[in-house]
Structure formats: structure tokens, C-alpha cells
Amino acid sequence: MKRFLKVQYLIFPILIFVVLYFFNNRTSLDLTETDKAKPVLIDSVQNQEVNYKYGFSIDDFQLEEFKIKRNQTLSVILSKQGVSSKLIYDISQKAKKVFNVRKIKSGRKYAMLYTKDSLKTAEYFIYENTPKEYIVFDLTDTIQVYKGQKEITKVRKQISGTITSSLWNAMLESNADPLLSMELSDIYAWTIDFFGIGKGDEFHVIYDEEMIEGESIHQIKVIAANFVHRKSNNYAFAYTDGEKEGYFDEDGNSLQKAFLKAPLHYSRISSRFSNRRFHPVLKRYRAHHGIDYAAPTGTPVMTIGDGVVVKKGYQKRGGGRYLKIKHNSVYTTTYMHFSRFGKHVGVGSRVKQGQVIGYVGASGLATGPHLDFRVHKNGVAINPLKMKSPPVAPVSEQNIADYNKVKDHLLMELDGGVKKVQDELVFDSTFQRLE
């Protein structure tokens, strides 16, 4: 018996060893066989350059790009691509919650993705709704419509220039988007009269420009600037103080002043800003680029900001008694349907924020007493209720230390750009003397 147990003790470890050896070899064999295929597969994926557009691997399709022509609708476009009437109807129904297909506009880009075979079947129609957004119409069996966003990259740029004729031309000469001049006029609206800038004024700007697929989409954010007007520096630094974002000078003071939220008290809005409003008197649709405040006759109307009265008059078939005030080189406001004007208010008068300039009435084309209030920014009508209210207070004490760090860093970058321009001017003048 003891002998049998000894034999068992000897055989059992041997059996375990054999089983483990066989299992390990089998596993290593399986892994080896699998690993032989995997690296090749992984390497092929890693080395293969995949081209993506609209969220698709474009190499899997035939891609063709077009522009919407005049009077082209979704139905017209897809019919020419061989898409059945039933599928066009189904896809337009699917689109209702995502995009109004009637708003497809001429001149916009669109793309078709076809199968990579001789049949060349249309599988996807992609409409570029904006430079950033596109709408995908899935024409396969799944039949779905969804929105997509293009990848946006921000490129930090720095430019400097000297005005010889106009700011717009100076921007072009500096190879910058001329729309940057509009951004600067907005930032410095309360500091510099951009109608008064002239030859010899300089600008030094650091800004971010949004790009899609290597092309600018004309979305610009000024980070820091110095506008040298009449040999005087005017710095502006973008900073977010708590929840408020604005532009501040080198001492942390805001460059902007706020407008009053509304030009009168005790009123209600009877009509809003619209590109197509049914006129209660004319009985037809037309644009209404203002806000109507219904209020009793005689309610005082105040100017929403400091400025100069540039127009005063009467329009029998329009705004009745009205005033137009220029606040700066960017903003003007118009007040219409007065019952009477405020005292000592005429063309050329300087008015202060909150000053009474007239009284609510129903003069001109009106069905009842109200104020028609309008705001123009750079000559274009904007919705007064959507005007951004910039911070007017300086940077808060709790954030001033952080602001100074940000400002000092940007100041060094700006001054570096100034020095570079000065060095180039010295080099040019020296080169001309040598010639």
C-alpha cells in the first residue's frame, strides 16, 4: 500500500507537468498563429492613409461636389441622380425634424457619395448649410437625415500695419482679412472715432482666425491690439472676468460703455424685430427692423447712450416725428412716432444717456401710441433685444492679478510685433539709400 502511494506521488506531478506543457505549447502555438496575422493587419491599417470628409471614409465612395443652381430643389437634384420619387418623399419627411428642405439656397455647396462600382448608385446627399454645418441625407435602406459639424481649427496670427489711405486697404496690404477692420472699430467704438483715423495711424493686432480644411471662414477673435491714433497708444486685451467677456486697457479698465436696456419705462413689446411682419395699417408683409414698445401717449423716451442728434424730422407715411442719434462710429439709434420732441433737442445737439428726447405718440403710420425703436451697427439693422451688453466695470480685484499676467504676456508679443515693423522700416530706408 505504501509503495502504491509512493508511485502515485511520483506519477501525479509528472501528469501535471505533461498537461501543463501540452496546454502551454498549444496556447503558444495558437498565439503564434494569431500573432502572425495581427501585426500585418495592424501595420496595414496604420500605414494606410484614410481620407475623411463629412464623417465618411471618402476612399470607400465616389465623391462628386457641386453647387446648388437657381431654382434647384431637393426633388430636382435627387431626381437627376436617379433617386425614386418615393425615396425623395420619404427622405423629405424624415428631414422635417432636422432641416427644412425648402431652405436649400442657390450658390451653396453640396456633395454626392456614390457606390464604387459601374452602377454608381447615389448613397448620400450632403448639403452644406453653413461653412461649419452640413446636413447628411442617407439614401440607403436606413433612410435618415442628420446634422454634422466640420472640424474647425483656430490659427493664431499677428499683423502690423500703417494706414496710408484707409484701414480697409491697410488690412489688405497686411495680408489680413479686411473684416478685421470691423472688429477693431467695434472694440474701439467708445475710444476712437474711426471716421477720424488718418494717414500715419498704426495698428498691431494678435487674433485667432477660424479655418476649415485650410480655408478661412471669416470668423475672427481679436486677442490683443494696440491702435496708435495720433501718436497715442490705445491698448485692448480680451479677458473673461468671471462670466463677462470684454476688452480692457493696460490698467484693467473696460473699453466699452453700456447702453440702457430699453429707451422707456412702463411699456410692453407689441411687435418684435422681423424680416417679414404683417403691417397693421398697410395690410401686407414687409420687414420690421425694430422693436415696438406700446405705451400711453406722453410717456417719456430716453436716449440709450451718449451721442449727437444727426436727424430730426417728420414722415407722414412712415415714422412720424422721429430722431436719429449717432453714438459713435459703430452705433446709431432711431426713435419714431413721437407725439412731440424733447426740449432743446435738434440736429447737432449732444445728448446724454437717459436724457428725455421725446414722448410716445402715434404720429405717422401707426394704429396706436407706441415707440418704434431701431438700432444700426455699422449701417446694418440689428435686433435691439440681442445686443451684447459688454462689461463696463474694470477687472475685479479678485482677478486683476491673473489679468496682469495675461496682459503682460500679450504686451510683450505686441511690442515684439512693433519692433519687427520698426526694424523692417529701418532696413527698407537703409536699402533705398544704398540704391
Image: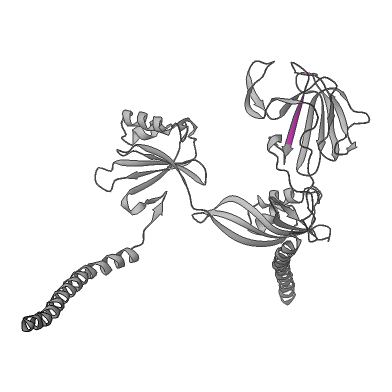
Vertical comparison of 193 with 226: above or below: above
Residue closest to the far front: 1
The quarter in which the C terminus is drawn is: bottom right
Residue at screen point 80% across, 32% down:
263
The magenta span reads: 363-375
Q: Nearer the viewer, residue 339 or 317?
A: 339
The image quadrant that residue 367 belongs to is top right
Count of residue discs? 0
Q: Position of residue 112 (x, y in %)?
A: 37, 43
Image location (x, y in percent) of residue 429: 74, 72
**Closer-to-camera residue (161/336):** 336
Q: Is residue 140 left or right of residue 392?
A: left
Where does the image place residue 421, in percent across and percent down from the top left? 71, 68
| Left or right: residue 229 compared with residue 87 | right
Q: 318 above or below 220?
A: above
Task: Indicate the colouring scheme.
Answer: one colour
Inspect the magenta stretch and tell me whether residue 389 lies in it: no
Asked if residue 367 lies in the magenta stretch, the reply is yes
- Residue furthest out toward the right: 344
Q: Residue 338: horizontal and vertical position, in percent?
A: 83, 23
